[in-house]
Image (cartoon, rainbow, N blue to C red):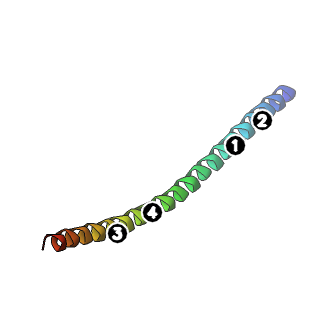
Amino acid sequence: LTQQTQISVSAQSARAGNAMAAADAEIARFKEILRQVDEMEVELDKVRHIRDIVKGYRSRVEGLERRMDRGGRR
């Protein structure tokens, strides 16, 4: 009976160890995904900033075109 109990406890311990290792691996994977999401958010902020700069330039160019059109009609 003692031997069977030891075998059972060993098996349970091995399963628990495997479950812990799997959980640790999933936690590490999740942390890596979160890191990548953070990195992508930084890149998206850069793209938004560039978009705002381009909008400003576009607006300035359109304003200059309107001024040139008005000047050419005189």
The first of marks 2 and 4 along the sequence is 2
Between the C-alphas of marks 2 and 3, the distance is 65 Å
**Dot 1: few (<14), some (14–19), or many (≥20) neighbours within 10 Å?**
few
The first of marks 3 and 4 along the sequence is 4
Instruction: Classify residue 57 as left or right of residue 68.
Output: right
Residue sticking out furthest to the left: 74
- The numbered mark at residue 20 is 1
> Which numbered disc, 1 or 4, marks the residue closer to the eye?
4
**Dot 4: few (<14), some (14–19), or many (≥20) neighbours within 10 Å?**
few
Q: Quadrant of residue 4?
A: top right
> Which numbered disc, 2 or 3, marks the residue closer to the eye?
3
Between 19 and 46, the one nearer to me in the picture: 46
Q: Secondary structure at mark 4?
A: helix
The first of marks 3 and 1 along the sequence is 1
Q: Quadrant of residue 12?
A: top right
Between the C-alphas of marks 1 and 4, the distance is 37 Å
Q: Secondary structure at mark 3?
A: helix
> Which numbered disc, 3 or 4, marks the residue closer to the eye?
3
The first of marks 1 and 2 along the sequence is 2
Between 56 and 23, the one nearer to me in the picture: 56
| Spot occupied by residue 66 in the image (x, y as percentages of width and height) | 20, 68
Instruction: Say what amino acid the circle numbered 3 marks.
Output: Tyr
Q: Residue under label 4, please give it.
A: 45
Q: Residue under label 2, please give it.
A: 14
> Which numbered disc, 1 or 2, marks the residue closer to the eye?
1
Q: Quadrant of residue 19?
A: top right
Instruction: Say what amino acid the circle numbered 1 marks.
Output: Met
Instruction: Say what amino acid the circle numbered 4 marks.
Output: Asp
Residue in the image at 45% along x and 60% along y: 47
